[in-house]
Amino acid sequence: MDVKLNTIRLVWVLSLAGEILNNAVSFAVFCVLDFVDFILCFVYKVIDFWIESQWKPCYCSFAKQHIIEGDNILVSEECESKIVCLTSTNLQLEDISDTLYSRPSIVAQLSNFIINDLNKTKKTTVTSTFTIDSTIVEVLRGNVVPRWSDCDCKICNSWTSSSKDTLFVKAEGLKDKAREDVIFIHGFISSSVFWTETLFPNFSTTVKSTYRLLAVDILGFGRSPKPTDSLYTLREHVEMIEKSVLEAYQVKSFHIVAHSLGCILALAIAVKHPGSIKSLTLIAPPYFPVPKGEPATQYIMRRIAPRRVWPVMAFGASVACWYEHISRTICLVVCKNHRLWEFITKCITRNRIRTYLLESFCCHTHNAAWHTLHNIICGTASKLDSYLDTVCNRLKCEVTIFHGGDDEVIPVECSYHVQRRIPRAQVKVVENKDHITVVVGRQKAFAKELEKIWKRSKCD
């Protein structure tokens, strides 16, 4: 009994010591990263001006008040941000995540303290209840040209040679006389090859002769357009999918299969087309219920990017989410040179493995990744509850959720949170699989599971 008790105490002590060490190291590392990102801000301004003869806007600067002559302005009040789009017929409000320009850091807090201290010595007057972020104004004005740090290869820029302003869609199966359609939506920093290189070859001949399989590259990723004047909001993503898939292929009713960030887009589409959804399959949905009184966007950012060095996936997410210029540097090194990394990988492995996941990971711009991460993952935090309630109450289709038991990107609890909002949803946890291997590596088994789901929908 004493040995067992001592073992429990030892485990508790080691766990506590590990947590303290992780917190201490994380604080030191992220203090350094705060400073590095601060320095990189000025470095990139100089390089951008030297190469492209103009300054590049970023979200490091403080929000400023602007009066602009264009049709779009951004207003922000009490952590709620919206774009006001003035058109000839109506006034549209489009949500923008305040996490784009409100990410507390040691450097930012120190700067705020100094500026606030200086302002105390001056008489100030409030001229408006709204503030407008200068960077978003510049983006909406279209003053942001393609960056020198983005990849210029044919794959990443194939959309520039096409006159069509639509997303890239890989279609397989019956084209004209398909009985049913299935739309596949990939996750963050990915592309349609996540589906076409894994699931598509493993579907049965019956499925290929019955269904039309449509895998889309979402806006800003893969072979789809990567506009530099876009803020990659939920509305833009959803409307482009509607235009490029539903309208272009005349899709009336359909199944949806979505992974990670794609689950949010899938839910938004399902809510807009409740009578058209035949089944909804979500893989690792990033749903974190927001406690009452918490700013939704900031809460989600802290959950997915906790500013911790361990586990490694949390560290990677934190760097991608908190640091605009460090993440741009990563895109410069990795994405712009993805052909080099693919070549090195093939040389090391003697071309024994396919590099489609590497291509999928690298085929995007920093502008697209940065805005999509903040405006979709963080910016939709206050909407997901209503989306899930709509799916629960208005949609009658089958809802199935798959999640890797070892997923360190999106914890398994997220799927169970979805199930609490949609009690009829079935959660299937795949043991010993993570965020990617829940599909990749078990594509044959997963393809069969999808076929069963679609077959059941016919009987309902």
Image (spheres, rainbow, N blue to C red):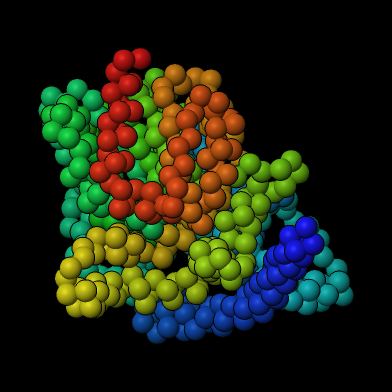
Quadrant assignment, res 115: bottom right
Q: 437 or 109: nearer the eye? A: 437
Q: Is residue 392 visible?
A: yes
User: Where does the image place residue 447, in percent across and percent down from the top left?
Assistant: 27, 39
| Quadrant hosting residue 63 | bottom right
Compare residues 24 and 371 and report the one nearer the observer.
24
Q: Tell me what residue is drawn at x 39 percent, y 71 percent.
A: 331
- In this rendering, the answer to whether 362 lies above or below 298 is below
Q: Quadrant of the N terminus?
A: bottom right
Residue that protrudes farthest toward the front in the picture:
1
Instruction: Specify whether 434 is left or right of 317.
Output: left
The tally of labels here is: 0
Q: Is residue 175 above or below residue 302?
A: above
Give residue 41's position: percent from left, percent from top: 53, 78
Instruction: State the image coordinates of residue 127 (x, y, percent, origin top left).
Output: 75, 56
Q: Residue at x 44, y 29 (%)?
A: 399
Question: Which part of the image, by quadrant, shows the C terminus?
Answer: top left
39 in relation to 234, above or below: below
Apparent side of residue 284 relative to residue 20 in the rendered image (left or right): left
Q: Residue at x 52, y 40 (%)?
A: 415
Residue under the point 62% across and 78% down:
29
Point out the residue furthest to the top here. 460
The reply to whether residue 192 is visible in this rendering is no
Q: Position of residue 398 (x, y in %)?
A: 41, 24
